[in-house]
Image (spheres, helix red, strand yellow):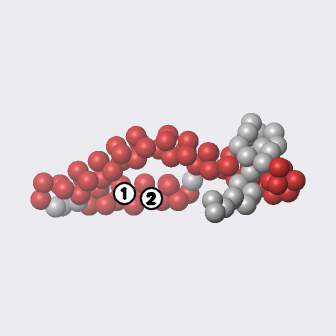
Amino acid sequence: MACGEKSNEVLNEIYAADTSPNRIVQRIIKDFLAFRAEILPWTRVSEQAYLNAGDCRSSSSSRPEAARDGQSCGSGGGCDRPSGNRPLKSSR
């Protein structure tokens, strides 16, 4: 959170100091902030999915028999994907 606060402080300083023709820096910052506000909820969704997948992988690594048998990871978190630790079958 501290990084985000500092980032906002820097943007505010740059925004206030803009003396460019047509205030182009201010327009860029406004566009960036609008984009960031729009994308932030989706970023949280994707980060949570990544964290959930990490929980699934860490649970399956403690159950090598599940990986061999193609069973779900059994993390208890609703993960029903097969473990990714199975060897791929050769097409030859």
Left or right, 47 with respect to 11, comes to right
Identified at 30% across, 53% down, the residue is 29
Note whether residue 64 is visible. Answer: yes
Q: Quadrant of residue 8?
A: bottom left
Separation of marks 2 and 1 at Cα, in angstroms: 6 Å
* Circle on res. 30: none
Classify residue 89 by image quadrant. Answer: bottom right
Q: What residue type is labelled 2?
A: Ser
- Residue plotted at (40% across, 40% down): 38
Q: Identify the residue position indicated by label 2 in the image.
A: 7
48 or 53, which is in the foreground?
53
Where is residue 61? Give x, y as percent: 81, 57
Q: Which mark is residue 11?
A: 1
Residue at image position (47%, 44%) is 40
Label 1, secondary structure: give it: helix
Q: Are marks 2 and 1 in contact (CB under 8 Å)?
A: yes
Mark 1 Cα-neighbour bin, 10 Å: few <14, some 14–19, many ≥20: some
- Say if residue 63 shows up in the picture: no
Residue at x-position 71% and y-position 43% = 81
Give amino acid for label 1.
Answer: Leu
Residue 75 position, x and y percent, is 80, 44
**Nearest to the observer: residue 58 or residue 7:** 58
Q: Which residue lies furthest to the front in this view?
A: 92
Q: With 88 as the anchor, is 7 left or right in this view? A: left
